[in-house]
Image (cartoon, helix red, strand yellow):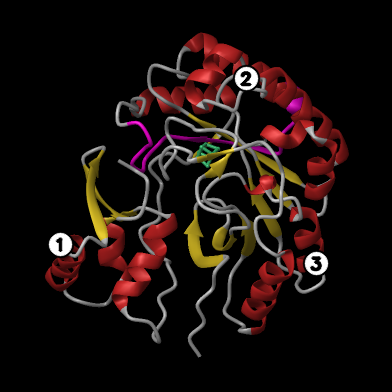
Amino acid sequence: MKVNYKYLFGPVPSRRLGQSLGVSPIPPKTCNYSCVYCQIGRTTHFTNIRQDFFPKEEILEEIRSYIESSINFDYITFVGEGEPTLCKSLGWIIRSTKELTDKPIAVITNGALLYDLETRNDLLAADVILPTLDATTQELFKKINRPIKELTIDKIIQGMQDFRSEFQGQIWMEVMLVKGLNDTSDTISKINAVLDKLGCDRVYVNVPIRPPAENWVKIPDKNRVLEICNELNAYNIAHYESIQGFQIRDDEDMESQILKITTRHPLRESQILAMFDLPSQDIIQLLHDMSKKGKLKRVIHNKQIFWLNANSKIK
Ligand code: SF4
């Protein structure tokens, strides 16, 4: 039976979480940051106020329905096209999901709201939290993450420290490197000092491999990324994007599957070719036809071809 989910997507292959069933509890582009590297474009709903954007029972009902469908996956991941902790009922949804399944629950977050006690309490029921730390000074924080006015990096780092002392699960921190902004020796030493204090279980170094919100964003040189990984004692997940593993459904046509995935996840052309068991020229023809009909956009980034949903805000 074909089911169209409103809040669920995937499972998609994740470099850190295997086959990850995504749950988006917020509307698109709802965030308290507007990062220069954001793969879904500039933030259009800029807010730091936690609220229930959708009925929490509806979100839980979709999760229940998916679990009952018995399709396999590794993690349930709260992620969204924006910042999922802005969902006020996130804690209720996580705790209720825990009653339905033993699958581990992950939350991918920018970590900004960890200064807030209610948000920290909401995240305690999860198994893995994946926050981000790209800067340790307010000046650089504003340049890279472009946060909403009231957020300061000192308050956020303190929140991360508080959360570490309260949370029994895993914290996997990500540092996204932007060439010329946070890949300098001085900045990396400062990030390293903060990471030491935070006691994360893992640190991942990433680069904006997918088309970013601002087209001037550049990826640091490969050797520099390796040096930084050594210094931060971090896993290097730069350039490691999986080219396979998107779950393809037999009961859904190719065009709608591509549209669904690209709504939330720009796809490299090579990924799309690997997903379907059809001649490459037929798939490429379909992509160009979809582009002519205004459904997809073709973007070159870092010398690779990406296909984006035309409704994406990415320029
Ligand atoms: S990268 Fe994440 S935190 Fe930054 S603007 Fe995009 S959704 Fe928000």
Mark number, residue 192: 2
Residue drawn at 54 percent across, 73 percent down: 5
Mark 2: amino acid: Asn
Q: Which residue is mark 3?
A: 96
Can you tell which mark lies on residue 292? 1
**How many marks on residues?**
3
Q: Quadrant of residue 92?
A: bottom right
- Residue 289: image x %, image y %? 15, 67
Image depth: mark 3 or mark 2 in front: 3
Label whose residue precedes the other's in the sequence (1 or 2):
2
Would the CB of label 1 be found within 8 Å of ligand 1? no
Determine the secondary structure under disc 3: helix
159 to the left or right of 107: right
Camera-side mark, 1 or 3: 1
The quarter of the displayed image where residue 234 is located: top right
Amino acid residing under circle 3? Ser
Q: Is residue 268 above or below residue 276?
A: above
Residue at the location (81% across, 41% down)? 120
Q: Is residue 263 above or below residue 40?
A: below
Q: What residue span does the magenta drawing correspond to? A: 197-214
Against 46, is 76 above or below?
below
Q: Are marks 3 and 2 in contact (CB under 8 Å)?
A: no
Q: Nearer the viewer, residue 161 or 291?
A: 291
As helix, strand or loop, the secondary structure at mark 2 comes to helix
Q: Mark 2: is the Cβ under 8 angstroms from ligand 1?
A: no
Callout in the foreground (1, 2): 1
Q: Who's the residue at 75% across and 31% down the image?
A: 160
Residue 209: which quarter of the image? top left
Q: Is the distance from the Cβ of mark 3 to the nearest ligand 1 atom less than 8 Å?
A: no
User: Is residue 126 visible to us here?
Assistant: no
Disc 3 or 2, which lies upstream in sequence? 3
